[in-house]
Amino acid sequence: MDLVPALEEPLKKVLGPATAKVMAEHLGLHTVGDLLHHYPRRYEERGQLTHLADLPLDEHVTVVAQVADARLHSFASAKAPRGKGQRLEVTITDGSGRLQLVFFGSGVHKPHKELLPGTRAMFAGKVSLFNRRLQLAHPAYELLRGADDEAAESVETWAGALIPIYPATAKLESWKIGKAIQTVLPSAQDALDPLPESLREGRGLVTLPEALLKIHRPHTKADIADAHARLKWDEAFVLQVALARRRHADAQLPAVPRKPSPDGLLTAFDDRLPFTLTEGQQKVSKEIFDDLATAHPMHRLLQGEVGSGKTMVALRAMLAVVDAGGQAAMLAPTEVLAQQHHRSIVEMMGELAEGGMLGGAEHATKVVLLTGSMGTAARRQAMLDLVTGEAGIVIGTHALIEDKVQFEDLGLVVVDEQHRFGVEQRDALRGKGKQPPHLLVMTATPIPRTVAMTVFGDLETSVLDQLPAGRSPIASHVVPAADKPHFLSRAWERVREEVENGHQAYVVCPRIGDEEDDPKKSGRKKSPEDEAEKRPPLAVLEVADQLAKGPLSGLRVEVLHGRMHPDDKDAVMRRFAAGETHVLVATTVIEVGVNVPNATAMVIMDADRFGVSQLHQLRGRVGRGSAAGLCLLVTEMPEASPARQRLNAVASTLDGFELSRIDLEQRREGDVLGQAQSGARTSLRVLAVIEDEEIIAEARQEATAVVEADPELKGLPGLRTALDALLDEEREQYLEKG
C-alpha cells in the first residue's frame, strides 16, 4: 500500500476534523504542507511588547502584554435583577499604552482567577471603542508564564525568545495556529527540496527543512533572516521554472518564418513616412523582425510609455508579415479603440491600404475592421476578405475570436493592452493559424522589470522609453476642490482659455450617471479613508449638463461613455477629432489609444477614485501634438490622506515606470499578480516583487539553465513536487493557455 507523503497528509487526520475545517474554510489550508507554508506575519519579543498605542480600530489583533489591574463589578440587569450580574474589567499594558479588556456573565470566572496583576499573556480579539477608549470584549488569551501545569506547558510551546504571530481569523487565534504548526513541524524533515543542491550550496542557503524550522521556531533574528532568504528563493525559482518550461515548450512549436521582401510593402511604407523612427523604435523593430524570421513563434511583450509610438512599431511588424505572404490581426479591447486604430492605420498607409481598389499602390493590401456591432453586410464582406486573403490586416475586438472568423494564413497576432484580454482569447486567436502565429503583446502600462519577469515571464520583453520628436511636455496639478473651491473655478477658466486658443479639452468622470450605474444599487463597500464617499462619484451626464449651463456655457460640450450605441460613439469621436466639439466629457473609454493631437487639456473629476496607472494612461491623451498639455486632478480628499499623496505622486512625475513602482508599493503586490494571473491566487508569501529584484532576475537565469539541461526535471523530484503544488488546476490551465 502506498504511504501518503508526510506533507500531503490531510490536516483532518492530523489535527482533527473541527480544526481542519476552520483552517480549510478560513485560511485555505488543507494539507500538512499547506500549514507548514503558512508563515508568521511577524514576531513578538518577550521583552519588547506590541505597541498598544497603535492598535487599529475594528481589526482582529493579537497582542502580548502584562496585566496591570483587574476589577470585578456586580450590577443589576434584566437577567440578574438582584445585582448578581458580573463584569470583569482588566487593564493590560505594554509600556506604550494601556488597553481595557472586558468579560461578562458566566465568562468572568476563569479570567478572574487567571488574569492577576503581573501575569503576562497573549490576547486576541477585535478592537472596539467604548466610552472613547479602545477595548477588547471577551478576548481569547493564552498565558505565557506561571506555575501551574497549563501555563508551564505554554512556555514550552513558545520556547525561544521570539513568539510567532500568524495571519489568523476570529475563528482561529494565532496561538492555536502556532500549536497546530508545532504538531506538524516534525514532518518538515520530510520536505523535498525544490532547489538543486548546487544552486543552494552556491548561494549559501539553508535546507528547506531547516528553513521551515527556523521560520516557525526562531531563537534569534538571524534564524528568521536565514529562513526568509531561503524561502524567497523557493518562491522565485519555482515560479521562474514554471515560466521557463512554458518558454521552452513554445520554442519547440513550429511557426512559419516571416521575412519581409526587400522592396515590398514595408519598404514602400517606410519611404512614405514624413519623419524618422526614434532609436528606440528602430531597436525594438529589429528585435521583432529577428523573432519573426525564426521557425518558432515569437512571444514578445512590447512595453511603451504613453505616446512612445508602439502602434507604429506594431504596424511595421504587421506589414512585414503581409510582405512575407501572411496576414496580421490586431485585437483591441474596445470598439472605440478598434475603430480608432483602423482609422489611424489606414491614414498612415494611405494608398498602401487600398489593395484591390482603383488608385491602390502596387504593393497595397486591404485593411479591414471587424467588430461586434457592424452591420451584417459589412461583416460578411470583412470575413470574406479574410478567408480569401484579400485583406492582409484586420483590426477588431473580441469579434475576431468567434468560430465563424477564418483566415487564409494568419501569421501575426498583435494584442493591444494585454491586461484586458483573457488568456482564453489569446489562445482562441492563436488556434486560427495553420501553425501557431507569432504573438506581439502591447501594453502602455509601464511594468517594473521584475513584475514583467514574474507576470509576463513567458514573454520576451522590449521597452520603448523615448518619446517621438514633436511630443510636448504635460504639466499636472492637483486641484483640492474642497479646501480651495476657487481653484476649481480657475480650472474651468483654463479650459476656456485652451478652447479660445483653438484647442480642445477632455473632462473625465468615474461614472456614467444613468440608472443602471447608480452606486447605491451597486452595493460597493465604502473605504473608511474616504470621507468624500458620502456622495456618489461624479457622473458624465450630470457634469456635462452642469458645465454646459455653467462655467463652459457657449462651448460645444459632448459626452462619450461605454453604454452609447457604437455608431453614436464613433460619431462623437469623429466630431471631436475633427475639432467640431470643444469639450468631451467622458468615462475612461478614452483611457487607451485615443489620439487627438489638438486636445491639450484634461480635467479628471474625483481623481482619487482612479488608480495611479490609470491616471497616467488618461493623462497621456493630451500633449500629443506640438502644444503643451495640461492635466488637472480634481479631488475633495483632505491634504493628509493617502489618496492625496497618490495624486501628488502622479502630478510630480511623468515617468510611468516610477509611477508603476509607487502604484505597486501602495497596493498589495498580490493584487497586481492576481489580476495578471487570471484571478489565480498569487503564490508569493515572502517574496516582494519590488524589493527582491535581484533574486527574481537571478532565479530567472538559474531556471532557464535548469530547464534547458533537463526540460522534464527528471533529476529534480523535489522541484517537480513544488511545481505541481504551484500549478494547481487553475494555474496549470493559465500557463498552458498563456
Image: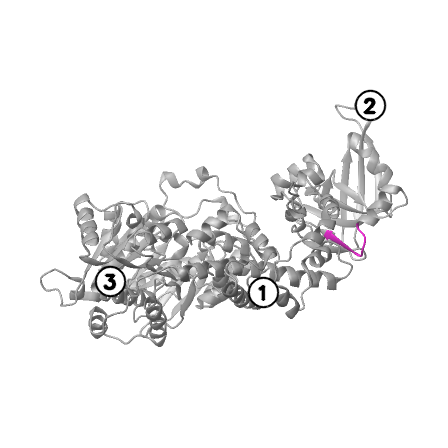
- Indicate the amino acid at tag 2: Arg
Question: Regarding mark 2 in the picture, which secondary structure is present there?
Answer: loop
To which quarter of the image does residue 377 belong?
Answer: top left
Residue 193 location, x and y as percent? 64, 58
Q: Inspect the magenta stretch and tell me whether residue 160 lies in it.
A: yes
Look at mark 2 in the image and give the residue it sits on: 82
Q: Residue at x 54, y 64 (%)?
A: 706
Q: Earlier in the sequence, mark 2 or mark 3?
A: 2
Examine the rendering and report whether any part of residue 306 can be seen.
yes
Question: Regarding mark 3 in the picture, which secondary structure is present there?
Answer: helix
- Give the mark toward the camera: 2 or 3: 3
Look at mark 1 in the image and give the residue it sits on: 691
Mark 2 vs mark 3, CA separation in Å: 87 Å
| Rendered image: mark on residue 656 | none
- Indicate the amino acid at tag 3: Ile
* Magenta residue span: 158-164
> Of all residues shown, which one is farthest toward the left?
358
To which quarter of the image does residue 289 belong?
Answer: bottom left
- Give the mark toward the camera: 1 or 2: 1
Q: Earlier in the sequence, mark 1 or mark 2?
A: 2
